[in-house]
Amino acid sequence: MELRNRLFVGVIGPSNPSKEIYELAYKVGREIGKRKWILVCGGLKGVMEAVAKGAKEEGSLTIGILPDEDKSLANPYIEIPIATGLKEARNLIIVLTSDVIVAIGKGYGTLSEISFALKYNKKVFGLKTWNKELPIIKVKSIKELIEKILHLAY
Amino acid sequence: MELRNRLFVGVIGPSNPSKEIYELAYKVGREIGKRKWILVCGGLKGVMEAVAKGAKEEGSLTIGILPDEDKSLANPYIEIPIATGLKEARNLIIVLTSDVIVAIGKGYGTLSEISFALKYNKKVFGLKTWNKELPIIKVKSIKELIEKILHLAY
Amino acid sequence: MELRNRLFVGVIGPSNPSKEIYELAYKVGREIGKRKWILVCGGLKGVMEAVAKGAKEEGSLTIGILPDEDKSLANPYIEIPIATGLKEARNLIIVLTSDVIVAIGKGYGTLSEISFALKYNKKVFGLKTWNKELPIIKVKSIKELIEKILHLAY
Amino acid sequence: MELRNRLFVGVIGPSNPSKEIYELAYKVGREIGKRKWILVCGGLKGVMEAVAKGAKEEGSLTIGILPDEDKSLANPYIEIPIATGLKEARNLIIVLTSDVIVAIGKGYGTLSEISFALKYNKKVFGLKTWNKELPIIKVKSIKELIEKILHLAY
């Protein structure tokens, strides 16, 4: 399938996660990679690094939308670094470029991305993330996450 | 006092609020105006319009940070329209330009602004807004809001 | 006249100008101030500082659209600092917020602003600035600048 | 070679070029494609479309940094559409994401991109584009363009 027609999965999460959340993000990345979905993330540390590592190991294309002016600041698992120079305003670009959003863990940047995704009517899947009061699709395992993406994103 | 040294109060809220929320925003605007604080908002309809109307009637300078390229789209109570052309990414500018944030009502754009404010360690005061899981300063009345701003923002 | 209905004059120029260009920008600022036009600029050093100093001394409202996240980085003559965090992308906001643009001196940032202004069909007046190949209105003196703004901007 | 270590070539030019400029951009795209460089462009019509068509036909990865919120607006030769919603402010992202810039033809958007590239000390190669007063590397043929990129960009 042409790259453009693949599912662009935006994965968002904090840059300083617990070890548990980091591992979870890594495993989500591997599942994304196995399906050759395109990974979109913020390109830096923490969840962004873990998910890109997993996805790249399995052969997915990994895109990092960086807050910085210098693309060399992307983590080593990003193949397509997009340097924006826009700081946190780049969070909107992550959302707009993705077909669906997966939130893993909690951070305020993560919450801004969930907000933008809901504003633009994009589906948000959540693993151990913000969810009170929010219409996100809560999942309890990676298996459930992938099943629900397959069911709802097409 | 020089304009620059006045308190810049960012007021955020939905563009299609209930009548109750619109009235509340209008009254908050008047209290901001009485203290000659500078009002920063998104410049469009709903809460943005109501708060600007109240603030302007009492003599405050009103700034509208617009998502549009055309500054004439600002509501009639905005004296300083800032045209950004950045769509929802302009929400970050509202937060960075404000010393404190007051959230009135609930919207996803509002939640993105609360998120940015917390990310940048700005105090967020909330009236009938998102608050579960969030370290915002909840207030139950306009009187309490103004007292807490006076107490905490200086 | 209401602030909003005044002419918003965007003045652009390098942050490290010659002494001659700095003086010129200061004098342009004074003329803007005498007419109570609203000054829009980039809020930092050099031409941005000189023109804001002149405009503020004569009583104009001065707006600085900053590339930074921190509004305290505005020069001391800015009364309304707008913190964007967008680096050079903020140049577009300066142009969109202004009714007309005055370019003084040469810089690559200045040239990007002239380009955006021409793209959006805004009139650009130029004093000792980029002009080869460009449809800007070249003026040779501050007197001529003000006359042409009065003639063409209304 | 890993995608990330390939040369990211930003090609900029007007959306409504002459037939001659369109053809030139197409041929430049093919040369980029033969070398498996990564193409970065604005993702829309005209020069952006022609260069992406050529590059894609030869097997290059093509990235389109769109001004729009909707990535489906990318031209059909873009494999990685990045939706920014930032209008002309997205021009900065094209420049920051590219290692070198090639300008083909003249437009004000193009000139803003040249300005940003020079501001960030990126090399700009020019074919029938803006050049008076500007330190861009003028080339007269596609052969000369490729030779100079090979000589100067590494």
Image (cartoon, coloured by chain):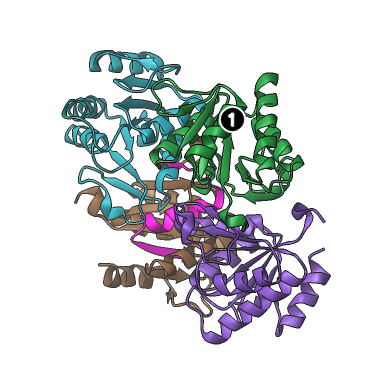
Chain colours: A purple, B brown, C cyan, D green
Q: Nearer the viewer, residue D5 or A7?
A: D5
Q: Identify the secondary structure beneath mark 1.
A: loop
Callout 1: 10 Å neighbours few (<14), some, many (20+)?
many
Q: Quadrant of the C terminus of chain C?
A: top left
Q: Is residue D18 in view?
A: no
Q: Nearer the viewer, residue B144 or A119?
A: A119
Q: Is residue C26 in view?
A: yes
Residue at screen point 77% across, 58% down: A6
What amino acid does circle 1 point to? Gly
Residue B152 lies, with reference to residue D116, above or below; the image says: below
Is residue D23 left or right of D67 when viewed as pictured?
right
Residue D102 lies, with reference to residue C28, above or below; the image says: below
Pinpoint residue D17: horizontal percent, then vertical percent. 65, 23
- Read off the residue under disc 1: D13
Q: Was residue B35 drawn as part of the magenta stretch in this picture?
A: no
- Quarter occupied by residue C52: top left
Is residue C36 left or right of C84 when viewed as pictured?
left
Q: Nearer the viewer, residue D65 or A148?
A: D65
Pinpoint residue C51: horizontal percent, then vertical percent. 24, 33
Residue at screen point 65% across, 43% down: D35
Q: Was residue B94 drawn as part of the magenta stretch in this picture?
A: yes
Is residue A98 left or right of B68 when viewed as pictured?
right
Residue at screen point 31% across, 48% down: C81
Q: What's the magenta region?
A: B81-103
What is the number of callouts on the image? 1
Pinpoint residue C105: horizontal percent, then vertical percent. 29, 26
Q: Quadrant of the N terminus of chain C?
A: top left
Q: Nearer the viewer, residue B39 or C122?
A: C122
Residue at screen point 76% across, 81% down: A144
Pinpoint residue A83: horizontal percent, then vertical percent. 51, 53
Chain letter of mark 1 equals D
